[in-house]
Image (spheres, helix red, strand yellow):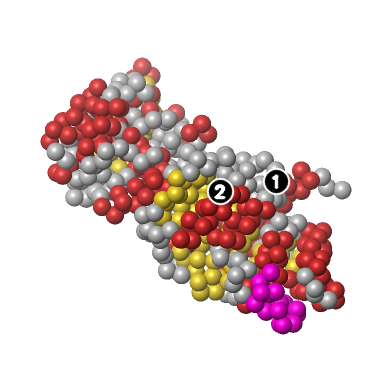
Amino acid sequence: MTSPASVRIEYGEVFTKRWVVDLILDLCDYKPDRDLTQLRLVEPSVGSGAFLGPILDRLLSAKDKHAGDVPWLALRDSIRCWDLQPDHVKTAQALAAGKLVDAGCPENDAHDLARSWIHVGDFLLTRHERSADLVVGNPPYIRIEDLPEELLAAYRANCPTMGGRADVFIGFYEHGLDSLMPDGRLAFICADRWMRNAYGKKLRGKIADGPFSVDTVLTMHDAEAFETEVSAYPAVTVLRRGKQGPVATGLTTDIFRPEDAERFSTWAEASQVGDSLRLQSVTAARLPHWHEGDSSWPEGSPATLAWLEKLEDTLPVLEDKDTGTKISIGIATGADAVYIRHKDELPKVEDDRLIPLAMTADVTTGEFRWGGKFLVSPWRPDGLVELAFYKQLSAYFKSHEGQLRGRNVAKRSDRWWRTIDRLNFDLLERPMLVLADLRARMQPVLVPKEYYPHHNLYYVISDRWDLEALGGLLLSEVIERQVAAYCVKMRGGTLRFQAQYLRRVRCPHPDDIDVDVLSDLASAFRNGDRKAATTAALRAYDLDSLPE
């Protein structure tokens, strides 16, 4: 007999509390005051009936109110449920039949309906027509490493959004959305990492580019939403097949309880753009629209999300052609031990083959202190060097030829001595601001010209910005708060200062910032004064304070 713990690992079962199910159904307007007998509801992973029980309670109450004379078997199309485990299906069928009989349905009809509603099957490998008014549930949490290779291949073939390291629940979102009729809704409680991680990119794109709307996002990381304690980073997400409209966003605390869920759902139903809800258990805001495209969707309090929306509507991005500001990453070699050498252990190569490198270790203090590393460069401004013209460089590279040829970049070309990235010689002619990835706080550092950044550093260059003033802006909490909302946080709250997130940052054009404010930003940067930088940045953004 399989133990409950091993079943959870194999099938990804995490059972949802009744009051959370009721919240989800309320947010979808699946309520007995409507004639629910006219709708089709789909539950893609029925489990032991955590969702099915409340669904049936509402459906049977609605039948009594609105369709008392309708034959019981007319409900045959009202529900469709799947599950991989036959025992779960039997349990769910017995639950359904029992509730039907208690409601006055003849026993034979009750068992007939239960069998027609609930099936053994794999939702991800089943073809679905656009016939669902509502898709609800708690998709299973199954890592791809726990799937047989053949099954994973079948899932990916059937669910194109399941790319990279996508969890199985990504496929449930995709097929659930594909099942919806016009104006139909999907409502899941599920880990929300897909909104920011790379593996959710295709799903975000499907939602943003297709005829889908994000209606509600209620983040419940600290709430007791499940019957067992799990680290699932859950959120209730309500999506709809239809044009994007206003969005109800909420953030719960660890004291979020059934009565708070009722207050949130009531507020979400009645709120207008700009309305907010502020309780100890939950804060919420109604946003005018949602984020576009497949880039990561931001995380933060409702007030922060509303602030980000306003910034996106009113200010340009930091990487801007008008200011000549560019954000990128330093050079990747594929074999740092060969290409990067300290000044005390330089190989015998031609002098013009050595380029001083700025490394992560050189900026850890908040100031640039060169550690003496050089790039042994195979590049000239016009392209890759010919080894025949550089005898010393040729001898050095050939002494490591086996290692260099083993890299993927070398396998794709006969030019085996190249680095992964090409050297951009223009960078050597200009100073830059650099940022190390994986830091608790944002710490821009000014690097003078003649140094080239290593691939562990992200850099910012600009034609119009005074780099010290821009450094003060980047040092401020105004910018850091934006990056924190967009990036995927690591354990302990460590932030990722990658180009993809820095490119989301919004800031005023330098010409629109008072000269005294620019001076204060530059001074704060030179002094490494984060508080002064934030004070000046708030003035630059015309803000009294940051959102809570």
Count of residue discs: 2
User: Going 70% across and 74% down the picture, which residue do you hit?
Assistant: 64
In the rendered image, the vertical position of residue 143 relative to residue 399, given as above or below: below
Could you tell me if residue 494 is visible in this image? yes
User: Going 57% across and 44% down the picture, which residue do you hit?
Assistant: 256
In the rendered image, the vertical position of residue 108 relative to residue 43, given as above or below: below
Residue 233 sits in quarter: top right
Is 511 colored magenta in this rendering? no
Residue 433 sits in quarter: top left
First reached walking from the N terminus: tag 2 or tag 1:
1
Mark 2: amino acid? Asp
Could you tell me which secondary element the residue under label 1 belongs to?
loop
Q: For this view, does 16 lie left or right of residue 534?
A: right
Could you tell me which secondary element the residue under label 2 belongs to?
helix
**Residue interval drawn in magenta:** 61-78
Q: Main secondary structure of the magenta part?
A: helix
In the rendered image, the vertical position of residue 351 relative to residue 190, given as above or below: above
From the viewer's side, name the closer residue of 283 and 310: 283
Q: Which residue position is annotated with label 2? A: 260
Q: For this view, does 403 lie left or right of residue 134?
A: left
Q: Which residue position is annotated with label 1? A: 227
User: Going 48% across and 56% down the picture, which residue do you hit?
Assistant: 267
